[in-house]
Amino acid sequence: MSADGPLSPLKALDLAARMLEANGFTVVARNERGDSLYLKRPDGPWHLRVSNHPRTAKQRSRRTDILASLIIDGPRSPERLRILVAEAVRNFQGALARKGDQASADGSRK
């Protein structure tokens, strides 16, 4: 396997976390199996989840602090990870902006 060849899902999760850290996120939690990571920026309560599986409806209803998820459910090349991480950051930023818009709308109704 070349240096740019596909990484196993767990290695890809670790690389994605390092890429997200370069974008200002910090890993704040990891599940016991090590297949789900929760990251956040220091300036807010919102999380970005990196995992090898999507969240269930029950998980989504319990964890409303997760604004975006990056799912790595198979081998991924580092180049593909860069694209997925950029998309996850954009999704996080978009969800954060929507939260801000909701807060502004709620404040203007009072």
Image (cartoon, grey):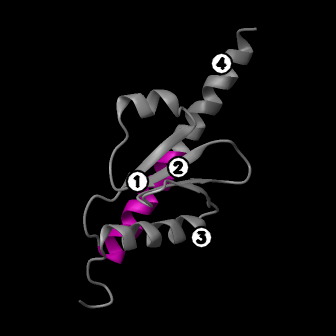
Instruction: Name the front one of labels 1 and 4.
Output: 1
Dot placed on the residue nearer the N-terminal end, 3 or 4: 3
Tell me whether the residue at label 1 lies in contact with that at label 3, contact meaning CB atoms closer than 8 angstroms: no
Residue located beneath label 4 in the image: 105
Distance from disc 1 to disc 4, alpha carbons, whole Å, reads 29 Å
Q: Is residue 56 left or right of residue 60?
A: left
Q: In x, y percent, where is residue 54? A: 34, 44
Residue located beneath label 2 in the image: 48
Q: Residue at x 43, y 34 (%)?
A: 59
Q: In x, y percent, where is residue 35? A: 40, 58
Say which quarter of the image contains residue 29: bottom right
- Say which mark, if any, is on residue 22: 3
Q: Residue at x 60, y 31 (%)?
A: 99
Tell me whether the residue at label 2 lies in contact with that at label 1, contact meaning CB atoms closer than 8 angstroms: yes
Residue located beneath label 1 in the image: 70
Graded by Cα atoms within 10 Å as few (under 14), some (14 to 19) or many (20 or more), the crowding at tag 4 reads few
Placement of the C terminus among the 4 image quadrants:
top right
Q: Is residue 83 left or right of residue 93?
A: left
Q: Residue at x 52, y 34 (%)?
A: 63
Dot placed on the residue nearer the N-terminal end, 1 or 3: 3
Highlighted magenta segment, given as a residue range: 77-92
In this rendering, is residue 108 above or below 65?
Answer: above
Distance from disc 3 to disc 4, alpha carbons, whole Å, reads 32 Å
